[in-house]
Image (cartoon, rainbow, N blue to C red):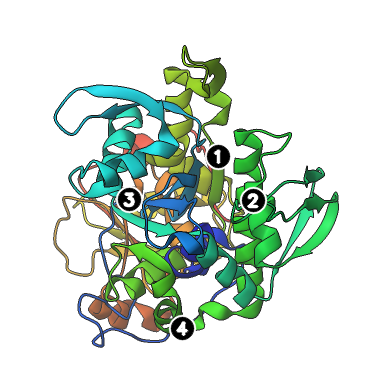
Amino acid sequence: MAVYLGLVIISRVDSIFFGPNHQITLGRIGGVLPGVDGSGDSGSKDRTNILVMGLDRRAREGAIPTRTDSLFVVSIDPKTNTAGILGIPRDLWVEIPGKTGGTYQERINTVYVQGETQKYPQGGVGLMKQVLLNQFNIKIDKYVIIDLKGFETIIDDLGGIDIDVPEAVYDPYYSETELPGDYFPVDVKPGPQHMDGKNALAYARVRFNTDDLDRIQRQQRVIFAAIERAKSLNVLKNAVSLWDKYKGSVQTDVSDIEIPKYAILAADVKDTIHGVSLGPATYPYTTPGGAEVLLWNAQKAQQIVDSVFSDTAAAAAAEESPTPAPVKVQVQNGTGSDGLAARVVKFMVRSGYPVEELNFGNALDDAPHAKSEIIDVDGANQRNGYLIAKMLGMSVDNYRKATAAEKAMLSANGTAIVVVLGTDKDYDQLIQSPATSTPGG
């Protein structure tokens, strides 16, 4: 599902994983599917965390519950248009809640099968959600599960993927089926390599003369390579039909109706995806029973988790992305303080914003505003809006896209962003302080 999530749910699904300056048009879907606004404003503005589990299950095994061969969480923050992937080592030693109370310790890759076989509430998914919440304070909103055959099918339908392999990977005894004598020797040389589904799966799964942390890095290379391939083929121009084609290959609680919503949500997350692993917080340990596992340092693990799931980290990730070209900004005074909008415009010019892109006036409704807002008129300037928020000392929560009525009223004069100054902030105090950022150069 690493790949499927990238193709359908999280990218434009393209943009959470894809690079900058690429856009795929889904077309208008508002009014066709309940709860979906074709303008792209659908859904909550809250962070969404999606659990992705790749099961170590062969086609011959049917639908039996098995251990997770890969495990990660994708987090999307629509407030800052950022996204992150947290890779979780399969050998991580965790506390697992018992169905009737208490806890026991085992590898995290056993959690799903334990939840299924023990009939834990919501099964293996429910137990995995509880473990992630208890151990790392990660709340899961949605989940996706894929097995080995589904993974291969998606890669093959893309025509294969291209990976620049940094180090050789070798396993003479690799087997997809793990049946006696059924070997598929793996010998991947360093350098650019084209892989079909079978070879990409083997590259991601090999454990011979390597470790769990190296596997996470290889799996993330496969994810990004698949997304680059999908981007080049423009396969996401119709997320709904793509979902119809592949939904039989996955198990998920994402409904058909929600697919366009997730596609629109992810469309705004362009070049701010970052991937990390809990690996640096772990260290090897041999249990009294002789099992080779990974223990983890709680403080270091929390720092890594925060780098993906905290709003502060998401904002920092957005800040690191390339600065967009300046757009036309109108500053409106909603405070009743005479001349404030003009003073804020002068402050923005001193901070480096081009004077020709700025104008000012009173709030259009001539009413006091208790909350400051940054309104994106056509919904295409989220990054600019975030940087202006930072310049003016606002929270990213102050940014929003314009309603249809606001867009009709404001777009006539070419304004791209409207800044409404509210009484919730002392802008004169800000103006007296040195500028700290320069959106647009």
Badge 4 local density, few (<14 within 10 Å), some, or many (20+)?
some
Residue closer to the observer: 327 or 80? 80
Q: Tag 4 or tag 3, which sits nearer the N-term?
A: 3
Q: Are marks 4 and 1 in contact (CB under 8 Å)?
A: no
x, y percent for residue 213: 61, 34
Q: Tag 2 or tag 1, which sits nearer the N-term?
A: 2
Cα separation between marks 1 and 2 = 36 Å
* Residue behind mark 2: 180
Q: Is residue 42 left or right of residue 355?
A: left
* Residue behind mark 4: 238
Cα separation between marks 3 and 1 = 18 Å
Q: Is residue 57 left or right of residue 19?
A: left
Identify the amino acid type marked 4.
Asn
Name the image quarter holding residue 111. top left
Residue closer to the observer: 313 or 287? 287
Identify the amino acid type marked 1.
Val
Q: Is residue 331 left or right of residue 212?
A: left
Q: Residue at x 23, y 69 (%)?
A: 364
